[in-house]
Amino acid sequence: MGGTASYFEEIIPAQIARYGAGRIALLAPSSELAAFPTIEGLVRLDYRQDRRSPGALARLGRAVRQALTIRAPALVHLHSTVAGAVGRIALQGLRRRPPVVYCAHGWMIDPDRETKHNGALVAMERGLSRLTDRIVNISPHETRFLAAQGFDPARMTLIVSGIRDRAPAPFTIRPDSDGGPIRLLFIGRLDRQKGFDLLLAALRHVPPGKVRLTVIGAALKGGEPVDLSHPTIDHRGWLPREAVAEVIADADAVVMPSRWEGLPLVALEAMRAGRALIATNAGAFPDLIEDGTTGLLVDHHDPRFLADALARVDADALRRMGLAARDRFVSRFDADRMNHDLLALYDELMLPEARP
């Protein structure tokens, strides 16, 4: 489930606290549910998913209908493109359909994406939106482009994603007088969306010894091979969430060269930790980052984006930006605010007899 699983970890405890143990159910593929953390009071429902095929989609549709029969929910919240499409179709024709909320967690029709047949996808998503009581957008970027593509504003609610706060780790004191290389951190899939190829190309324009890049993540199975032999790279593979927090604490900045993004939780984790972001001017990043104050916005079309960004700052400047990013996180991106807004939406839409 990736970033969506992290989102669930933020919202489910608040929902159980609000509505009671045993009243929140999560339906997910067996393989992904097995890796999902235990949350006391959560009902876990699973189904078998081998691959994205007509048979797999049919199994998902049947699982949704079966879950509705077993649980008779007061509200259904669908997440991500495939589950959102199949779930909304499966809910049609019911004698008493519960209210439906949908969150894409990154839209296929985001204009920043390089998607073929985008016109057909926009038409499909607009049609599905009419089967939805409310679409939750996780960033102003989503609200803007959906409105431009003809989606009904009355069906959309902006609830910016957030994560629970924790005290940031202190900045590591450098042992050498000249500060040493700037410590950059990349977290994510080593794929086209996340722009890791752009980062590798950009490293060629950075003077030797200027940076040390730690990489957390891996390429997708069957994806393009990735060359990690650059002398500045320390590749750690995938790490548990708590271990990731420790690596963030050792960085001067987190670099996110994505070609498109919804609202990545990694960015919020960096801001929470008081670390600056160096990110592209795509997707939600301009809504997250005050360029030159809480981080740096770069143009990923320019192969010198990293060298030019690093020419603007040193480790001390990045530290000051990180402290400002921490303040921005506390004021705008804490999970308490997100959960308050999401629960208020649920209460607004929920079947009257189910309201607390």
Image: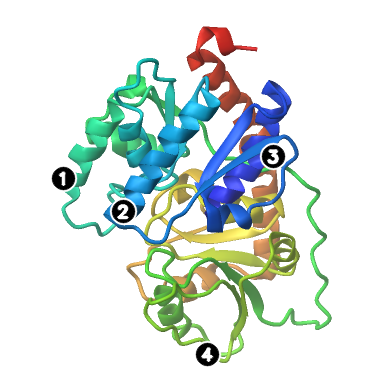
Sort mark 2 into few (<14), some (14-19) or many (20+) by Cα contacts within 10 Å.
few
* Residue bearing mark 2: 55
Question: Of the residues under marks 3 and 1, which one precedes in the sequence?
Answer: 1
The residue lying at 81 percent from left, 69 percent from top is 172
From this view, report whether residue 51 is shown above or below residue 330: below
Marks counted in the figure total: 4
Asked if disc 4 and disc 3 are in contact, CB closer than 8 Å, the reply is: no
| Residue 73: image location, x then y, percent | 52, 23
The residue lying at 26 percent from left, 59 percent from top is 114
Q: SS of the residue at dot 4?
A: loop
At label 3, the amino acid type is Val
Give the mark toward the camera: 3 or 1: 1
The residue lying at 63 percent from left, 36 percent from top is 11
Q: CA distance from mark 4 to mark 3?
A: 36 Å
Residue at the limit of the structure toward the top, as seen here: 352
Q: Is residue 310 or residue 83 the one in the foreground?
A: 83
At label 4, the amino acid type is His
The dot on residue 230 is 4
User: Viewed as shown, does residue 118 lie left or right of 296?
Assistant: left
The dot on residue 120 is 1
Sort mark 4 into few (<14), some (14-19) or many (20+) by Cα contacts within 10 Å.
few
| Residue 214: image location, x then y, percent | 62, 77
User: Residue 238, located in which quarter of the rendered image?
Assistant: bottom right
User: Is residue 290 in view?
Assistant: no
| Residue 313: image location, x then y, percent | 59, 67
Q: SS of the residue at dot 2?
A: helix
Q: Is residue 287 or residue 152 the one in the foreground?
A: 152
From this view, report whether residue 72 is shown above or below residue 234: above
* Residue bearing mark 3: 330
